[in-house]
Structures are given as structure tokens and as C-alpha cells.
Amino acid sequence: MEKSKLLVKDLNLYYGANRALKDVEMEIRDKAVTALIGPSGCGKSTFLKCINRMNDLVENVRIRGQVLLDGENIYDRRVDTTLLRKKVGMVFQQPNPFPMSIYDNVAYGPRLHGVKAKQELDSIVEEALKGAAIFEEVKDRLKKPALGLSGGQQQRLCIARALAVRPEVLLMDEPTSALDPISTSKVEELMEALKKSYTVVVVTHNMQQAARVSDDTAFFLLGAVVEFGPTAALFSRPRDKRTEDYITGRFG
Amino acid sequence: MTGDTLYHKKKRPLEALLLGAVYGAASVSVLLLCGVIGYVFAKGAGTLSWSFLTTVTSALKQTVGIAGNLVNTLYIIVLTLLAATPIGVGAAIYLNEYAKPGRLVRLIEFTTETLSGIPSVLFGLFGMVFFGEVLGLGYSLLSGAFTLTLMVLPLIVRNAQEALRTVPDSYRSGALGMGASRWHMIRTILLPSAIPGILTGIILAVGRIVGESAALLFTAGSARLLPRLGGGLLENVKKLGGKALESGGTLTIELYLQMQNGKYDVAFGAGCVLIVIVLCINLWMKLLAGRWKTR
Ligand SMILES: Nc1ncnc2c1ncn2[C@@H]1O[C@H](COP(=O)(O)OP(=O)(O)O)[C@@H](O)[C@H]1O
Ligand SMILES: [Mg+2]
């Protein structure tokens, strides 16, 4: 797990005149969990969205710098965003299953990318639901509307939906902040399991969560990375005074 | 303040009065509606008969019937919706999903709003000159349908836009985040969620189409003929299609003309049929919308 999957070089992002990311540098390791922490509005979500170019959809955004995925700059003009987003999946803060059946939710991505055969879809859906640790709970109601699930189940369904396109990187933006404690611990366990096969980048508000699930942690403040390194070291011996203040709860 | 007790419930006569007034207004409007429908049926029921529904008024054969107008009404409804629904929904998708919010969007929205405030005779005049003369469609069902398309477009656009607006943004980013193109996202996520709203627009449009007279009198005319069928299947299809290019009066036109001639019983009869048609279409659309929601 020493290989790097993503290399971020001198990344700057402007919303109009507002500079939301400042000279961000980061090396995200393959098959590891990287946590992004920091107070609200410091640019964590913005940074996360840069990794699968979801910021392209926002008006008046300017981006400078590079994000290399396996050595390829995702902001290169030749990049196809559909292929990029197939490789780099995203799970949002609010569970957002589509208003269709559980099965159709998970099959949405594979269908989008051209899988048509019923049997193949069936096995992809089952595999993805198992990967997101929700198969046992929903296997008897695959044709039921996804919106009938509980919040925690919906979020794991969204993870399954993202896994179904077999991504290499999984971005999660505060995936547990809308969930109850039991669902939260399920999703945390899931992250542990996911890093065997995926590179996971997770934004979290919760210090303990970052400490529990991540291998590396980046601390953001006002759009800049203040400190980045192995989680254990960052939490036990922070190098920067501001990091220490934040992780000990003195501000934020 | 009089001590600490809570037991000082005040009587509020104004409140009671207002409540009464609101209930009164509600019952008056329901009663009026029921009254009008009841009156039309009481007057028209005597005229309704199988032959009234299945023959065409003809001095030669001594028959009085609205079969031709019934068919014309269906033609106009179907043709208008075939033109207005794709254009209206397309425009709503453009305005809501593609266009950058700004002056152009506001201009288009303002124009559609204005379009719905123009009296229908004016549409009739425009349709007669533009579709009838310039495009050479003459007095025809097609010319009438195109004219009505202009009239119902605002209803369809507005309702489709409203429906698209209520679809949460999280669905959009969910689909786009998996690599869906914008159009794929619209087709698979937005449109299915917006169907009930689009159907609402269609219901309102049908009401407007069925009720229209002035705009059609100048464009579709008032002919009462049934399509003359016969021959092979292909020939029949051709004849049915050809009918769109012939003149034809809807039930409302017929009602108007009969009223002018003092034939009130026939007019009320046509009125009953009109009400039933509108009712059926509304119920059907509600059923469709309901079925869609429970999917
Ligand atoms: N779509 C947007 N348009 C303009 N400004 C934005 C947008 N999204 C975020 N911002 C701004 O960028 C900064 C970083 O926001 P965000 O990345 O959401 O922070 P975080 O996720 O760390 O709470 C904030 O100042 C926020 O106001
Ligand atoms: Mg955020």
C-alpha cells in the first residue's frame, strides 16, 4: 500500500473571486483510507469534488494545478469525464438514492456504462450490495422502492451503487453525518473493509472517526492544507499548533 | 393580566365570522359548479341517444348527431398534444437544465407568460393567416391544432418547469457523479420524476383545447363530416391521416353554432358530451400520474 494512487500538485480553485483552495499538494496512497478534516467551509468538499471533476458543473469555477490519477492529469483536455467518474466514484453527505427500486439503483451505473445482460447485471448488483454490507437486509425486497429504506440503509445502498461500476477510488463526503450511531459504525466498518480493494478518500467532521478509520489524514484550514501525514502521527504528535488546537477541540 | 390562571379563553367573534365566510365561499363555489353541470345534464339528457352520438347532422337523411364533431374533437386534442408536449417539455428542460440563469431565460419565461394572456380570437386570426394562408393549410384540423399548440404551450412549459424544479439536486449530482451525461441523467432520472407534473400540464391543456371556440372557428372551421372509411387497411390509415387536412368543427364549435340557430336542445346535448369527455380525460390522467408515483 505504499504506491500512490493520486498525486495533487499545486491545486488552486476559485469560485468567482473567492479562492477556495490554496496551493494544495497531496499524495494519496493506493488501497488506503485518507481522511480530510477541518472546520466548516475550509474547502474539504471542494477538494473532494476536484478529484472527479464534479466542480465542472458549478458556474464560474476556475481551477489551476494538476490532479494525477495513476500518473494521468484528470484536468487534461483529452480526459473523458464519464470514464473518469467510472474510475472515481462518489458518495454524498445526504443519502441520495434515486426514486426507483433498490435493484435499479444499483444497476444504474452498470447500465449507464453499457451492461445489458440480465444475468450479468444480477451478479453485479448482488456483489455490490454484498460489498456495501447491505445484501442480507434487502435481498428479499430488491424490487421495492429504495426510498423506503432507513437513512443508514440508504447510505449503504448509495455505496453499493457507487461500487457497482467497479471504481478504483471512492470519494465520501461526510458519509455518516446524517446517520444514527449504529448506522455510522456499520459504515465505518465498511470503510475498513473497502480499503482492501479501493482507495478511499473521506471527509469527516468527526475526529474520532478520522482516527479510527484512516491511514492518512489531511487537516485543512481556509482552503490550505496545514498538515498532512500518517493518521497516528498526526493525532499523537501534531507538528503544527493549529492542528493541535483543532484535534483537541479548541476551535472548529 | 388578571392573575395567573390560564382559564381565560376569549371569545373571538371575528374569527368565527371569518371561518363562516370561508366555509360559505367554499360551499358556494362547489354548489355553483354542481349546479351548472346538473342544469346542463337536465337540459341535454333528453337529446342524448345512441343515434345522437353515432350519426352526423344531415338535412337529407333527417338526422341530428354529433359523431363528426366528436371525432374532430379527438383529432384536435391528439394533434395539439402531439405538437405541444414535446416542444413544451423540451423548452422546460432547456430552461431548467441547460440555460444559464439570466436575461435570456427571463425573456423566454416572460414571453410564455404573455402568450397565455392573449385573447384566443387573436390566436385565431394569426392561425388563419399564418397556418391557413402562408403555410397553405387552409381551414383544416391541422391548422387548428397548430394554433392551439401556441395557446397551450405556456401551460405545458410552466407545469413541466415546476415539476423539474421540485426534483432534488442530489439526484442530479448522484447521476452525474457516476459518469452519466446530462441528457442521460435527464432521461433516466428527471423526466420519470417529472411525469406527474407534465401530466398536470396536459390536463390543463386538454381543458383549454376542448373549451376553445374562437381560435378554432377561423382555423379548423366547422365541418361535421365523419372520415369516409373503406378499402384496405393502408387506405384507411391514409384516409384517417388525410382528415387532418380537412376542415372540422369540434363539439364546442358545434355547440356554439347550434346555440346561434336557437337549437338549444342539441347545444345542451353536445354540452353533456363535452363535460363527460373532459371528466374522462382528467380521470385517466390522474390514474396515470398515480400509477407513475407508486412505481
Ligand atoms: N458552489 C459554490 N459556489 C461558490 N462558493 C462555494 C461553492 N461551494 C463552496 N463554496 C465556498 O467555498 C468554500 C469551501 O466550501 P466547502 O468546500 O463546501 O467547505 P467544507 O466542505 O470544508 O465545509 C466556502 O467558503 C464556501 O462558501
Ligand atoms: Mg462539506
Image: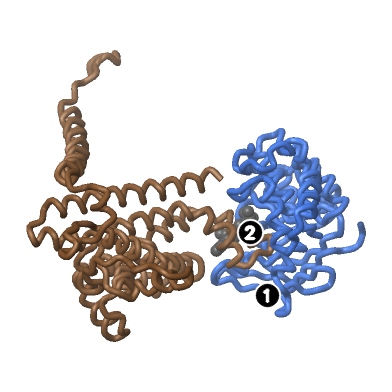
Chain colours: A blue, B brown
Q: Mark 1 falls within which chain?
A: A
Residue B101 in view: no
Image quarter hosting the N terminus of chain A: bottom right
Q: Position of residue B52 (x, y in %)?
A: 23, 53
* Three-letter amino acid code of the residue under disc 2: Ala
> Which residue occupies the extreme right position in the image?
A2
> Which residue occupies the extreme left position in the image?
B262
Q: Residues within 10 Å of mark 1 (few under 14, many from 20)?
A: some
Read off the residue under disc 2. B175
Read off the residue under disc 1. A64
Q: Compare residues B56 and B105 and report the one nearer the observer.
A: B56
Q: Position of residue B237 (x, y in %)?
A: 44, 70
Check disc 1 and report its element: helix, strand or loop.
strand
Q: Residues within 10 Å of mark 2 (few under 14, many from 20)?
A: many
Q: Position of residue B124 (x, y in %)?
A: 22, 73
Residue drawn at x 61%, y 48% as measured from the top left:
A100
Front position among marks 2 and 1? 2
Q: Compare residues B52 and A195 and report the one nearer the observer.
A: B52
Q: Do the dots labelled 2 and 1 sit on one chain?
A: no
* Three-letter amino acid code of the residue under disc 1: Arg
